[in-house]
Image (cartoon, rainbow, N blue to C red):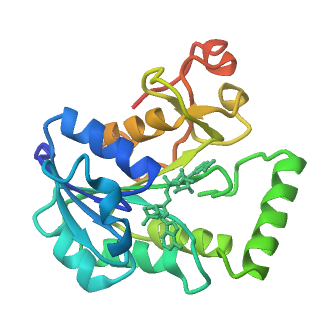
Amino acid sequence: MEVDPVRRICIVGVSGKLGTYMTRHALARGYEVVGVCREKSVPKLADLADRITIIPGQTDDPDVIRRAVAGCDGVLTVLVPWGVKDYASGTARAVLDHAEPDARLVFSCGWHITKDGQDRYKRRFLALVKIMTLVARWARLADIDDQVRATRLIFASDRRWTVVRGSDLEEGESQGLPVWSRHVGDPVLASNRTRRTDFALFMVAALDGDSLVHEAPAIVGRTTASALAHAEVRTV
Ligand SMILES: NC(=O)c1ccc[n+]([C@@H]2O[C@H](COP(=O)([O-])OP(=O)(O)OC[C@H]3O[C@@H](n4cnc5c(N)ncnc54)[C@H](OP(=O)(O)O)[C@@H]3O)[C@@H](O)[C@H]2O)c1
């Protein structure tokens, strides 16, 4: 089936670091951008305000999302588990419920999310996730388990979704489109490092075509040692 090209997109969580990078990449590709962020974060977008449409509001508010995604061919969602009121799963549900029927839906998360249980994690990584989950919930700052629930909703959906799983992130100039693999533990991912701008580049590139539909790519920077050591690397 021929898929219409993406022209207008919505970025949910547009005012954060990842959201701002995605906006710049999307504008460079010529997309029309609608962005959702909390009312108090609108001033963070002053540099971009004349080039995008901003819809202020909570990203888990179905009415806000319904207005923002109307007419969009693609939706890029920064999935974050802030607070203890199911913010991530509320956001995912609102996007899944209200995006246009054929829209490409691309969500961000970390390596701790697993689609099929086949990821092979280091014990240290699992211990760190467990500690962060307990501490964040105790402080009522974030509910990392809710990001897990959010991605379960996405994986169970028949929408045209992709869940991009980011490695540890760093700032810096772009090194180009990251490479990806289906499972954490695959040798190509061993360096566990991606520039944040390139995570954003991958999210935007994932909108194109169908190759990543119903995939949960785990990504790593294309110039990292592990990516360079493996010739079988994949890009979008
Ligand atoms: N940080 C990492 O090392 C890392 C590693 C792998 C994957 N990831 C994934 O990358 C994505 C971006 O994460 P990031 O850490 O790089 O941060 P980020 O891009 O700055 O995004 C943080 C988002 O959370 C929102 N936010 C912050 N505090 C909030 C609150 N109290 N209530 C509601 N929303 C709030 C921000 O909105 P405002 O602008 O309104 O504050 C922003 O949209 C996430 O999906 C994350 O799982 C991150």
Q: Position of residue 181 (x, y in %)?
A: 57, 35
Rendered image quadrant of residue 221 = top right
Q: Residue 189: percent from the left, percent from the top?
A: 66, 31
User: In the image, residue 96 lies at what x, y percent?
Assistant: 33, 72
Q: Is residue 49 above or below residue 154?
A: above
Determine the residue positioned at 19% across, 34% down: 29
Is residue 14 among what the camera can see? yes
Residue under the point 20% across and 39% down: 27
Residue 117 lies in quadrant: bottom right
Query: Residue 65 at what x, y percent from top left?
Result: 26, 75
Quadrant of the image containing the C terminus: top left
- Residue 209 in view in this figure: no
Give above or below for 91 relative to 79: below
Q: Is residue 209 left or right of residue 185?
A: left
Q: Is residue 2 above or below residue 233?
A: below
Q: Is residue 38 left or right of residue 209?
A: right
Q: Nearer the viewer, residue 228 or 52?
A: 52
Residue in view at x 37 percent, y 78 percent: 58
Instruction: Identify which residue is drawn at 53% across, 33% down.
Output: 180
Q: How many circles with numbers are drawn on the protein?
A: 0
